[in-house]
Image (cartoon, rainbow, N blue to C red):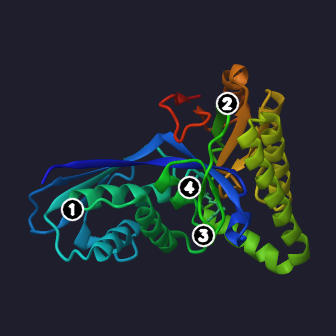
Amino acid sequence: MPAITASASAKLILLGEHAVVYGHPAIAIPFSDMRLHVTVEPAILAKPGSLRVISTDMQSDQLFYEMSDDQPIKQMIILLLEYLGIKSIPSCTLRISSQIPLGAGFGSSAALAVGIMRALSAFLGHSLAEKELDQLAYQSEQFIHGRLSGIDTTVIAWEQAIYYQRGHAVEVLKPLNTLHFVIADSGERTPTVQSVAYLAMRLEREETIIKPRFHEIEKQVITAKHALHIGDQQMLGEAMNQNQNILVDLGLSSPMLGKLVSAAREAGALGAKLSGGGQGGALIALTKTETQAELAEALISAGAANVWTTDLPGNQLSFPSSLRRTIP
Ligand code: PMV
């Protein structure tokens, strides 16, 4: 059996995070140059038919049968084998390495699920369609996060820009013009499950205040989708800024994110907002190509832990390999 390597991209939410959990639409894009790789290769292990899981980033090296049942990777593998109807596998090593920062709004756990499912299924002679990958990864994500919209696994399984609403068919978006982004990691971390729970608590206590904000977000998402189609970057940037204002009101930003948003706007961003679970994590800024490098510098000076630039090409379905990583 030959060794198989598969990968999965990171993702960014352009607009609509959190409201998407409550059935409103959101737009997500793949961050294709930031990836997680999984290699599965045959191995000779003491116990035949066993699997060794090595994660270079987590510096862990474990045998599958020694992993505790609540470990997400174990759950992912069990789910996949059950789905494929496979009861025994040839001894193998599964090696994971990732460029995706953990818990920062880049979809690291969804990428882990998609990467493992892709590589292991291919190793076992099954190729999974995007839809199957999405469903399996979504189920396994629920072990980790509980209440989730499913947008992360969908955008990562399809690796295309999407307009996503629970219970509706996924729409692939093809922006008219190439979009230029600067992405920053605030360096702060709040688990998504925690920011989602915080908003759920506020919604319960202040329903009449919070619900209308979700409807405003929905309008911004629809405006952004239209702006993408007609190639109006000012309109898109403005929708992102308005979305950020609501996320601030909902308590989902943070002082550092606020500082980075201001720095991005001062350095010429057309729009800047948090991306993902918030209360820390990632920032996404839309910029003109000529100000992209300057904006990245401004975010580093404002205290970003890391900054990347990336482009979403017009009328194409995936990112080119044009990521430049700037280490402060
Ligand atoms: O996993 P994160 O931090 O990228 O956040 C996902 C976006 C949320 O809307 C906050 C949660 C969800 O399931 O959609």
Dot 4 surroundings within 10 Å: few (below 14), some, or many (20 or more)?
Answer: many
- The residues tagged by marks 3 and 1 sit, at their Cα atoms, a distance apart of 29 Å
Q: Earlier in the sequence, mark 3 or mark 2?
A: 3
Which quadrant, please, contains the C terminus? Answer: top right
Q: Earlier in the sequence, mark 4 or mark 2?
A: 4
Q: Indicate left or right for 68 with 289 as reference.
A: left
Which residue is tagged 3? 148
Q: Nearer the viewer, mark 1 or mark 2?
A: 1
- The residues tagged by marks 3 and 2 sit, at their Cα atoms, a distance apart of 31 Å
Callout 1 amino acid: Leu
Cβ at disc 2 under 8 Å from ligand 1? no
Q: Which mark, by number, is residue 124?
A: 1
Percent position (x, y) of residue 216? 86, 60
Q: Earlier in the sequence, mark 1 or mark 4?
A: 4
Q: Are marks 1 and 4 in contact (CB under 8 Å)?
A: no
Q: Is residue 24 above or below residue 290?
A: below
Task: Between residue 54 and residue 164, name the one nearer to us.
Answer: 164
Task: Between residue 144 and residue 85, name the one nearer to us.
Answer: 85
Residue reaching furthest bottom? 204
Which residue is tagged 4? 103
Callout 2 amino acid: Ile
Callout 3 amino acid: Leu
- The residues tagged by marks 1 and 4 sit, at their Cα atoms, a distance apart of 30 Å
Callout 4 amino acid: Gly
Q: Are marks 3 and 2 in contact (CB under 8 Å)?
A: no
